[in-house]
Image: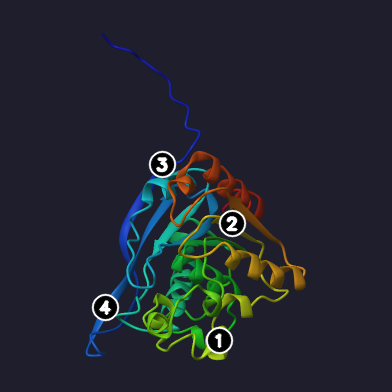
Amino acid sequence: MIKKINVPVLKPQYTVATDVSFAQVDYWYGHTRMDLKMDIIYPEDKTKVYPCIVWICGGGFMTFDKSAHLAYLSQLAREGFVVASVSYRTSNIAQYPSSVCDVKAAIRYLRHYAERYNIDKDHFGVSGESAGGYLALMAALDANKEHEVGAYLDQSSKVQACLPWYPVVNMTTMDCDNEIQASRSYDSLMMGFNVYNEKERALKNCPISMVTKAAPPTMIIHGNSDKTVPFKQSLEIAKEYEKNSVELTIVEIEGADHADVMFFQDDVWKIIIDFYKEKLGNPSVAK
């Protein structure tokens, strides 16, 4: 039996480019070098440019897997975005602000190669979970020029929208039982000092201290039963957004814990997709 069909071409083909090197950094006590890599999901369509969303995996600043959520990120891409899941140096390799510098370097790389991946250079969003949520907010809020290091410095790392999941916004108010525990916390290991003994210093390096009127529209998704990054963290930074008259929406997921399966349900991803479509727009005709 032969079944003949006519197929109208309504959507582009999407391609996944894995392990794309976007920067080289020092490694092994400064003796060697390592590549920082990203996975990019992009449309094979030269007639349009697409908003770009940068994703940052979490893992307590100690570990991550940039490919872990590609199944969900591809769903986001097929709604009309280029999506790049990026790597960064963890706390056992380099301490603050290395991870922040790495995320900014990734955004500059994507702007530099915008034509190659059909990216709209004027419309970037950034998302991440937990430690990646902290880095997403830092990418959106941190204006420290000293954190712009490496290649493609002629490109901007500015983003036009931010959507972190259960982010650490204030390391000094995270729940901690004693000084020994504090010295070994994920946050202290990343910063390179005990954030509870040097709260003023730590606070300067937290998203809550960097909110200004220039902050992009932001949406935070957080479970109110989070035992790792308490929901009150999101409420803390909400006060700073309100003080600066900047748009912030908090999506509170009832009963959700840290990295809960609830975050991977269609209802949540519809909220994510709708937010980015509203703030970054749809693909536009290539110039």
Residue where numbered disc 1 is placed: 145
Residue where numbered disc 2 is placed: 287
Q: Residue furthest front?
A: 177
> Where's residue 49, x and y in %?
54, 53
Task: Give the spatial CA distance, label 3 vs label 4.
Answer: 32 Å
Task: Give the spatial CA distance, label 4 vs label 1.
Answer: 23 Å
> Where's residue 243, x and y in %?
76, 73
State the mark number for residue 13.
3
Residue where numbered disc 4 is placed: 34
Q: Is residue 195 shown left or right of residue 124? A: left
Closer to the chain start, of discs 3 and 1, is 3
Label 3–label 1 contact, CB within 8 A: no
Mark 1 crowdedness (10 Å alpha carbons): few <14, some 14-19, many ≥20? few
User: Which label lies toward us, 3 or 1?
Assistant: 1
What secondary structure is found at the residue carrying circle 2? loop
User: Which label lies toward us, 2 or 1?
Assistant: 1
Task: Give the spatial CA distance, label 3 vs label 1.
Answer: 38 Å
Viewer can see residue 157: no
Closer to the chain start, of discs 2 and 3, is 3
- Looking at the image, which residue is at 39% across and 57% down? 40
Task: Give the spatial CA distance, label 2 vs label 1.
Answer: 30 Å
Nearest the eye: 255 or 25: 255
Q: Amino acid at mark 2?
A: Lys
Mark 2 crowdedness (10 Å alpha carbons): few <14, some 14-19, many ≥20? few
